[in-house]
Image: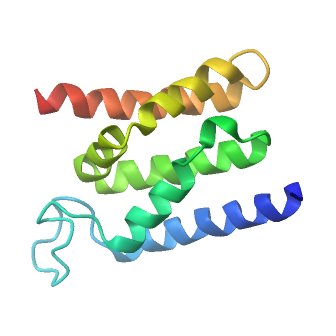
Amino acid sequence: RRVEIRQAAVAFLYNMVIHQTKIIPSSGTDKNKTDSSVDDGCLPDHIVNILCGLLESIDSDTDDTCTFRRLLASGRIMLHFGDVASSLVLTLGFHDAIERVKKNSINSHPEVSKLADDILSILNTFKLSDN
């Protein structure tokens, strides 16, 4: 597959995530909004699809730019939607793939490894608060 097409697609998804996190209320904010999907413990379907698509097979991505952008978009979703998104990532086992990305890129691409570590910290914070 052509790398530049994949990079452009992931950049588009990241921009879409930025837009969506501006128009969809974050977890636990603005109770006057009529969209209660986050407040009732559910992510909007399209956010679930984006998050799963971003993290699916992330540890086998051969392009570091794509991996970095996928992690950026995923992290933004987790930060914005909080425990609901973090719970989904943990339940589906994506944290293992993120851990492998961190480990595999620590020497060759430290910025990818650092971002993976930051996302794992978000997930660990959720796990600690869940107990």
Residues 119 and 47: in front is 47
Q: Position of residue 16 (x, y in %)?
A: 55, 71
Vertical relation: 10 (above or below) 22 = above
Q: Nearer the viewer, residue 93 or 32?
A: 93
Q: Quadrant of the C terminus?
A: top left
Whether residue 11 sits left or right of residue 87 in the image: it is right
| Snapshot quadrant of residue 107 | top right
Look at the image and name its color scheme. rainbow
| Residue at image point 65% right, 50% down | 69
- Residue at image x 61%, y 29%? 101
* Left or right: where 31 falls relative to 1: left
11 sits to left or right of 46: right
Q: Quadrant of the N terminus?
A: bottom right
Expressed as whole percent of the image width and height from the top left, the position of residue 55 reads 53, 47
Residue 97: percent from the left, percent from the top?
52, 32
Give whichever of 59, 102 is nearer the camera.
59
Q: Is residue 18 above or below residue 127?
A: below
Q: How many marks?
A: 0
Residue at screen point 61% across, 50% down:
70
Which image quadrant for residue 49? Answer: bottom left
Q: Quadrant of residue 106?
A: top right
Residue 112 placement (x, y as % from top left) = 66, 32
Taking the view exactly as shown, the residue that stands out farthest to the top is 107
Asked if residue 61 is positioned above or below residue 41 in the image, the reply reads above
